Amino acid sequence: MDGSASLTATSALATAPASAWARLRSRARARWFRRDTWHGRARFLALVSSPWLIATIFRVPFCPTALFLRMPCPGCGLTRASWAMLSGDFAGAVALHPLAPVVSPVFVGTFAYLGVRYVASGRTDLKPWMVWLLGVLSALLVALWGARMLGAFGGPVPI
């Protein structure tokens, strides 16, 4: 056997474990977020929702409308109003967003329902009455936003 053939065989053996290790790492990474198992879906849901949770906990404005357009959106003040309700300040919550006592529990309940349903079965479809309720609440949010932009209910919420 000549020297070049043994060198080729030696280099092939030297690179085989590295490529096998890379494939194993790639498979492990893919398995970590596989969405065909409940724990993979739970990890994926945690990954997707973590920026919102971190921004909410540290009270960082997360509204793209407020950040880029410098004007309140229909939901502006809703997170702060929800925090005020959780601390027992219902008057402050209503001052920040008059629909907070109605909208916050429905939105939190809907997102919790969807999260549990997604983790358990991989499905994210809503029941028709839930779609209707969310549509009505969204229309109310837009109507309230328009009224506040015109000066009603204390005017636009500060951003």
Image: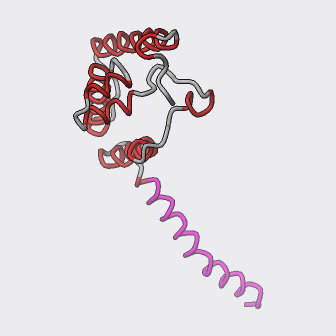
Quadrant position of residue 22 = bottom right
For the record, the magenta segment spans 1-30
Quadrant position of residue 128 = top left
Q: In front here: 63 or 120?
A: 63
Q: Residue at x 51, y 59 (%)?
A: 26
> With respect to residue 109, does 14 lie above or below?
below
Tell whether 8 sits left or right of 50. Answer: right
Tell whether 72 sits left or right of 57. Answer: right
Quadrant position of residue 93 = top left
User: Could you tell me which quadrant the N terminus lies in?
Assistant: bottom right
Magenta highlight: main SS: helix
Position of residue 114 measured from the top left corner of the image (x, y, whole percent): 31, 30
Q: Residue at x 22, y 34 (%)?
A: 88
Q: Residue at x 37, y 22 (%)?
A: 97
Residue 153, magenta (yes or no) = no
> With respect to residue 144, does 108 lie above or below?
below
Q: How is the image coloured?
A: secondary structure
Position of residue 52 measured from the top left corner of the image (x, y, whole percent): 43, 41
Position of residue 82 measured from the top left corner of the image (x, y, whole percent): 32, 31
> With respect to residue 16, does 73 lie above or below?
above
Residue 2, magenta (yes or no) = yes
Position of residue 110 measured from the top left corner of the image (x, y, whole percent): 29, 26
Q: In front here: 134 or 75?
A: 75
